[in-house]
Image (cartoon, helix red, strand yellow):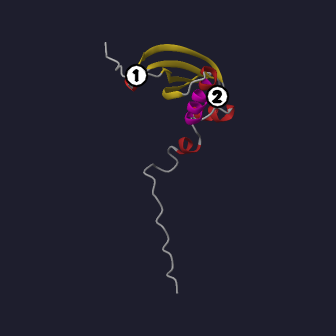
Amino acid sequence: MAAAERPRPRRVSSRADGEGEDQDRQPSRRAASRRRTGVPSAAAAMRSAAEQLAQLLGRSPDSVSSLKPTEDGWEARVEVVELERIPDTTSVMASYKVALDEEGELISYERIRRYSRGMIDRST
């Protein structure tokens, strides 16, 4: 014979009754507007930026070093190996600024920096 399951205790909210209910039920304006317009998630935007830049350059991206939402979609920084050398730390890298529209389509890109892979940024 199986033992009867115990009912789970209910969580008690630390808020007073009715306080903050609107915040729990409605997403922020920014989140709501992104869902309505079909803007991709951050992960999807990263993949999209890397894939579309690879198609244009004919080189595979090494990494996406930054991603931020903008009024018109997303802006990403994508690192690409421009010239492979041995040892690997001497390979020439490039950093591209990539702009994506609200649907995640690439609308512009620009190479903003070239550097050796082994080079470390120094604070000025």
Any magenta on residue 2?
no
Residue at image coords 46%, 65%: 9
Tell me the residue that label 1 is attached to: 117
Please state which of the two labelled residues, at mark 2 or mark 1, is closer to the viewer: 1
| Image location (x, y in percent) of residue 122 | 32, 17
Residue at image coords 64%, 28%: 104
The magenta segment is 42-53
59 left or right of 103 in image: left
Q: Quadrant of the C terminus?
A: top left
Choose top left, top right, bottom left or bottom right for residue 29.
top right
Q: What amino acid does circle 1 point to?
A: Arg
Q: Secondary structure at mark 1?
A: loop
Numbered marks: total: 2
Q: Nearer the viewer, residue 87 or 13?
A: 87
> How many angstroms separate mark 2 from mark 1 (CA)?
28 Å
| Magenta stretch, overall SS | helix
Q: What amino acid does circle 2 point to?
A: Gly
